[in-house]
Amino acid sequence: MFEQHRQALRARGYAGHTLRQRKMLYSWLLGFESNCGKLLDPTTYNLATHDRVLGYLRFDRKLAPNTIASFVRGLKVFLKWCRDELGLPVAVELRKLQSKHQNVVKMWLTAAYLDALSTAILPAHLVRVRDVLLFCCYTGLRYSDVFALQPGHMHEWNGSRVLRVLANQVMNCYLKKVGQYAGLTCDVVVTELIAGEVVKKSVPKYELLTSHTARHTFATQSLLRGMPVEVLQKILGHKKI
């Protein structure tokens, strides 16, 4: 049913980013089924089952709170589709499937850090990871955008050579090593919600370095250099300023 739902969204012209999110959500649901040895069914999915799914995502898969919140939003869309378009008697009241977003550190890189990254002496396997990050910092592309680049997208640049992009999880792991080599070692205070308690701790800046840092860097550096926010909004593809 979930694959049928995803194909329906695809036929209706939903963006590739949304379809990839739904595919990931599907894989997490399958993971839960494999973990607990029980199949999920929209007609019997209740709050108790939902709590077990959230526990699996949080503690077994170690997903971040905002990732789990996005999962819940996608799950509600799927269950609503089952109810309204397939006519199934969905067991749970959708408004009770709540999720909470947390404010997280939106890290971006200064011009000095960009210079440090570009000149850092790195092991060979980290060079291409650094290059992809810098490319995204200067273009504002998401990881998924640069991953999907084809030679036909590249005009008059290095023989239309496309960057070799690793899997996002692998890239994010390697980026922390890149950050260490580049000297991103100053401490940053981060806040986490652990077992309902707000916990603050200091971590080195390189620990927060991910492929999505590039988007924040492009946006912040563009504003600092005088780009109108309305132009930046259109470049990034955001619906709201």
Image: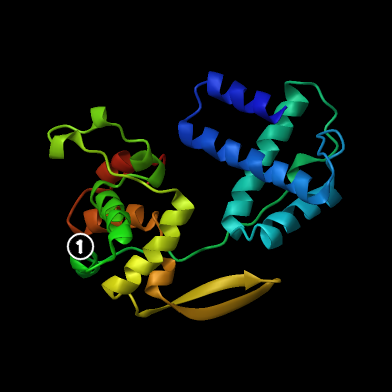
Instruction: Please tell me which residue lies in front, 83 or 240.
Output: 83
Instruction: Please tell me which residue lies in front, 76 or 118.
Output: 118
Q: Quadrant of residue 62?
A: bottom right
Instruction: Please tell me which residue lies in front, 185 or 79.
Output: 185
Colour scheme in use: rainbow
Instruction: Please tell me which residue lies in front, 137 or 157.
Output: 157
Question: In the image, 45: left or right of 81?
Answer: right
**Relative to 206, residue 48 above or below:** above
* Residue type, label 1: Ser
User: Regarding mark 1 in the picture, which secondary structure is present there?
Assistant: helix
Q: Residue 153 appears at what percent x and percent y?
A: 25, 31
Q: Which residue is mark 1?
A: 118
Q: Residue 48 appears at what percent x and percent y?
A: 85, 51
**Relative to 14, residue 171 above or below:** below
Please tell me how many numbered marks the rendered image carries.
1
Question: In the image, 225: left or right of 104?
Answer: left
Q: Quadrant of residue 129?
A: bottom left
